[in-house]
Amino acid sequence: MKNAKIFIYLLAIAVLYIVFQQVNGNKKINADRLKIDSLKNKVTQITKVKDSLENEVLELSYFDLRFDEYAGEYIEDQGFSVAAMESLVLDTLVGANSAENDNPFVPLAGLDGTTKIDRVKLLNHKWAVADFTDGTYWGQVLFLYQFNKEKTLAIDVITSHLYSKTK
């Protein structure tokens, strides 16, 4: 009889332990399920942001020589590589900056200093746009660039704009 009581006590403890493990396991499963759902929502949001950014990059790169297949083919047909042409045009425009004189490719004289080209973007195989400043005033200029039969670079200004000083 004494063995039976011990067996009943052990059985009761085992049942309580199993019930405790079951309840604790269910709580853990529910917590994990909530965490998984939360992470799935975050992944969905991040995927939407990533897709939005990819679309933005595609939109911003539309007028960019490096992503224009037709312009790239045209350049290669002329015997150049896109990287070499881009480097040559950028070096020519930005390389003309000088501490003493205005950049000769900017059609406007500096009002508070010498004009310098800050940034250039090649739109395709013919056009480039540049940002320039004299330290106080800034503007933009649109260029037509092309290579003649001797493979030398010719740059012409199409138009420019100087922004008015706001402060």
Image: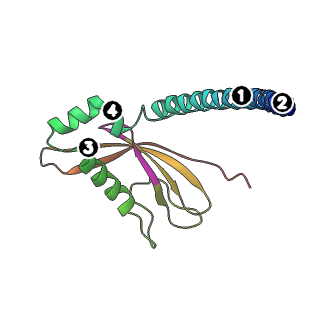
Q: Which residues are magenta?
A: 119-127
Residue 72: image quadrant is top left
Above or below for 114 versus 5: below
Disc number lying in front (1 or 3): 1
Q: How many neighbours does mark 3 have within 10 angstroms: few (below 14), some (14-19), or many (20 or more)?
A: some
Name the residue beneath numbered marker 2: 16
Q: Residue 85 in the image: x percent, y percent?
A: 26, 48
Name the residue beneath numbered marker 1: 29
Disc number lying in front (4 or 2): 2
Q: Which mark is residue 145?
A: none
How far apart are the two marked residues, 2 and 1, measured between alpha carbons? Answer: 20 Å
Q: Amino acid at mark 4?
A: Asp
How far apart are the two marked residues, 1 and 4, measured between alpha carbons? Answer: 52 Å
Q: How many neighbours does mark 1 have within 10 angstroms: few (below 14), some (14-19), or many (20 or more)?
A: few
Give the left or right position of residue 72, taking residue 28 as reference: left
Quadrant placement of the N terminus: top right
Disc number lying in front (1 or 4): 1
Disc number lying in front (2 or 1): 2
Q: Amino acid at mark 1?
A: Ile
Q: Earlier in the sequence, mark 3 or mark 2?
A: 2
Give the residue drawn at x 60%, y 30%: 43
Name the residue furthest front: 1
Secondary structure of the residue carrying numbered label 3 = helix
Q: How many neighbours does mark 4 have within 10 angstroms: few (below 14), some (14-19), or many (20 or more)?
A: some
Give the residue drawn at x 15%, y 48%: 151
Q: Earlier in the sequence, mark 4 or mark 2?
A: 2
Q: Earlier in the sequence, mark 2 or mark 1?
A: 2
Q: Amino acid at mark 2?
A: Leu
Q: Earlier in the sequence, mark 1 or mark 4?
A: 1
